[in-house]
Image: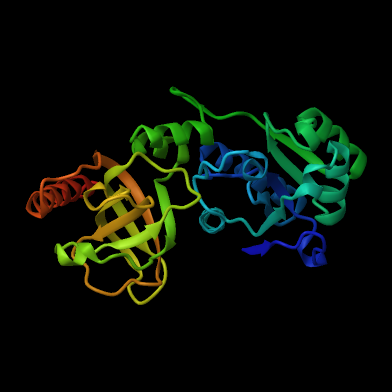
Amino acid sequence: MRIIRDTAYVDPADRGAAAAIGNFDGVHIGHQAVIDLTRAAAKAANAPLGIMTFEPHPRSYFSKDKTPFRLMNAEARANRLAKLGVEKLYEVPFNTGLASLTPEAFAQEIIADQLGLAHVVVGADFCFGKDRAGNVESLTTFGAQMGFGVTVAPIVALDTGNVSSTAIRAALTDGKPREAAAMLGHWHRIEGEVIRGDQRGRDLGYPTANMSIAGLHPPKFGVYAVKVDVLTGPHQGTYDGAASIGVRPMFGENLPNCETFIFDFKGDLYGSHLSVALVDYLRPELKFDGLEALISQMDADCDQAREILSDVR
């Protein structure tokens, strides 16, 4: 998959794709339905399968508070889209200039002129342009005028309601990763580089791989049963484990992070990239009377996680 970040000038070889447009935060089953329609349009037009998204996320640009909200960072999103067969990923820079474009100017300058898209697919609730004044009806009109086709994908719903990134965030906030996974079509994952921590886990007999969750929507703090993919380095593979997400109240105030203990693993993971899939929520963060009580609880957590993960591929 090619990632095109400089959309002011696009190589002719990267133009002419059929592309789905959206933020694709989480790449949930609704997004996947949009991508499936785009794949069909790409085949019909003999064009590459593309995704047009925005970086940074427009909500980051417009939001006055800095509360983390993203389900995945740009790297994790790209990894997921590549697995779905996307050939061209256009990460359009979201800035003051883009935000000020009228819907018609957005369609003309970005879709038609810069990217030269042959066909676009959007969700039924898609809005675009300054003040979100454009909708699927106006996009269809612009497409007819400017030479690109438009397909509108219906909203995907489950018994629990419409599938959306907002609903997935709510499930994660409630400590319900399996509900989130039903909407995502895959486990919710925290991806990133293993960074150096204070190494307390090693002293306790539970060495952990520490990862930042800065900028991401924080799941409910506590301990999870997890599947771990080591993506880079000499220990690449898939492992079972238990992860603690939170501020480590036993040891004072800290920035939220993800600490993962990988079962039956020996090796150095510093600098490696991990993908940690949240399978089940085990318990909230606790402050223990002493290290012995903490270690006893960690033993119990790992036993419970092993039992859960024995039935998870």
Q: Is residue 281 left or right of residue 49?
A: left
Q: Nearer the viewer, residue 201 or 177?
A: 201
State left or right for residue 141 relative to residue 14: right
Residue 156 is drawn in which quadrant?
top right
Residue 89, percent from left and from top: 66, 57
Q: Residue at x 61, y 56 (%)?
A: 86
Is residue 111 found left or right of 182 in the rendered image? right
- Figure check: 276 above or below 134: below
- The answer to whether any part of residue 40 appears in the image is no
Left-right relation of 21 to 75:
right
> Taking the image as drawn, is residue 162 in sight?
yes
Who's the residue at 67% across and 49% down the image? 53
Q: How is the image coloured?
A: rainbow
The residue sitting at 37% across, 53% down in the picture is: 257
Residue farthest toward the front in the current orientation of the protein: 252
Residue 55 position within the rendered picture, expressed as x and y whole percent measured from the top left: 65, 52
Q: Is residue 10 above or below residue 56?
A: below
Residue at (63% x, 46% y) in the render: 57
Looking at this view, is 18 or 265 the one in front? 265
Residue at the outermost bottom position: 234
Please give the count of numbered marks on the rendered protein: 0
Where does residue 182 sit, x and y in percent of width and height?
41, 36
Q: Nearer the viewer, residue 105 or 258?
A: 258
Q: In which quadrant is the N terminus drawn?
A: bottom right
Give the camera-side residue of 98 and 263: 98
Question: Where 124 falls versus 37 (above or below)?
Answer: above
Residue 302 % position (x, y):
16, 51
